[in-house]
Image: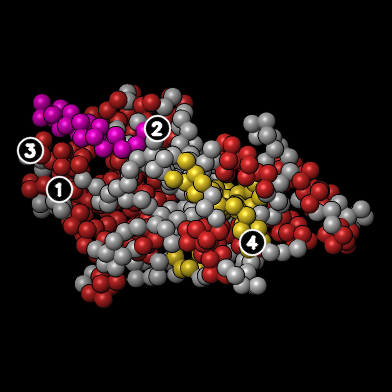
Amino acid sequence: MARLLVLGLLLAASALRAAQAPSLHLLSRKSQDKRMQVDAKAMRIYRSGLQASAESIRLKGAWTSFLDYQLALDSLGRYYRGFRRLAGAERSASILLSYAAFLAQVRCALELIEAAGDDRGLEAALEKPVPELGLPKGAYSRLKRWALDPERFKEIDAFDAAYEEWGGEADSPLRDAVAEDSAYLRKRAKGEAEALKPKNALSIIEEAGAKALFPVRSGISEFMADAKMLETKWSLISPEQIREAGRLLKPGDILLARREWALSDIGLGGFWGRAALYMGTPKERRAYFGDPETKAWVASQGIGDGDFETLLSMKRPEAYALSRKPQGGKEPRVIDALGEGVSFALFERTADADSLAVLRPRLGKRAKAQALLRTFQYLGRPYDFDYDLRDDKALSCAELIVKAYGLKLAEEERLGRKSASANLIARRFAEEAGSPERQFDFVLFLDGQESDGTADDPGAAVFASSWRRPKWRLASPEPKK
């Protein structure tokens, strides 16, 4: 009977927290299953990044990465606490996802606290504001209070009850992570087990359901390119604006995108989370690269008539064939790097975002043609979850752009490695504004306004300051449904 009470109260608390995001039960069964698969993969990667950041907390960038992973897991985990309206395998998978996220958060927080030790200088540094994530000063103290609170172990007991009762149907690699993290935490609690057992199920579960490590909204993961599973449109940029933006683009343009509810590019701070390269259609490329300089360069590569399309198809035949393959009846116009690796994408999908910017490299057409040819060679390479700019065996979206053009960006370190991010591209535009040596021209900025569910174009000056905006919006109003 007590066990049933624990289960019921856990579900009631879960319902309150799940109300912060569109309910999972409103999705179709197919969309539920797909999203859970994507988020399970995301959680494994976030957990790995969280552990690496905790172990390397003394390295530059580690604290920002750690907090970013924590926020992502908190957002995803709270979303999946709304499992009370699910049944069967879907409920089992939802319990597993929420439990796995919570355990990883607690374990890695304790590991970071141990790694930091009694170093007062490090603690003072960790207490400073983290503006790129939108966190005020005192984040480390808050983390310590949350992780070391005995209530966390009572919350584990409550999750154990739900997991034992309904978690048996889930078949996922996350089971191993749950077992490992649970064993680690139980070992830490050894000698205090009696004190940590739930004595008052109501107070334990209600408090656990009402509190979060940081007051972020629970969100929607778009970890992979095809993971936008909602049956309703949440993007602030309208289809009409996407069509208008498409008419302004030229091959070689750089796209920056942000989704308010996306959890991609976790581990790097900053407002802009995604960068992509506009390659255009074959018709657009033929028209754009028909200038004498580009044709002469193409001819020097053995293509007598100087046709860049012919060169592209001969030099990169497999990639070229894929670039011509329709997606949903439309031609791909973008090359991007997402969770599944470097691939071709529809411009409409890239621009289906909450904010979008277009920058045009201040280069000749020949240099842009060379950049596109170079980019095609990276097709199929895996996504770089380490964000390591030193090699191109794996590439993040921003690394793809940097490699294509040889961009000069401000240096950013993550766990001792040089990294690139979409936000650094926006920052470079701001730093070079007005300079004759600037690398980009401004084309467009569609700035999402959550207050009224629209996006407008405030111009280059506002875009130039956008890189300073926080990545996470803490305790902000929910978007209109």
Q: Earlier in the sequence, mark 2 or mark 1?
A: 1
In this picture, residue 195 sits left or right of residue 139 = left
Position of the C terminus, as image quadrant, is top left
Callout 2 secondary element: loop
Q: Which residue, given by chain and number where applicable, does mark 4 sit on?
A: 441
Magenta run includes residue 346:
no
Crowding near the residue tagged with mark 4, few <14, some 14–19, many ≥20 C-alpha atoms within 10 Å:
some
Return the residue at label 3.
Answer: 200
Residue density around tag 2, few if under 14, some if 14–19, many if 20 or more, within 10 Å: few
Chain-order first, disc 3 or disc 1: 1
Circle 1 is placed at which residue position?
A: 151
Q: Secondary structure at mark 4?
A: strand
Q: Residue lying furthest front in this view?
A: 458
Q: Are marks 3 and 4 in contact (CB under 8 Å)?
A: no
Q: Earlier in the sequence, mark 3 or mark 2?
A: 3
Task: Give the secondary structure at mark 1.
Answer: helix
What amino acid is found at the position of numbered circle 4 in the picture? Asp
Q: Position of residue 70 (x, y in %)?
A: 33, 53
**Mark pair 2, 4: CA separation:** 35 Å
Q: Is residue 11 on the magenta stretch?
A: yes
Along the line of sight, the residue nearer the viewer: 459 or 161: 459
Main secondary structure type of the part rendered in magenta: helix
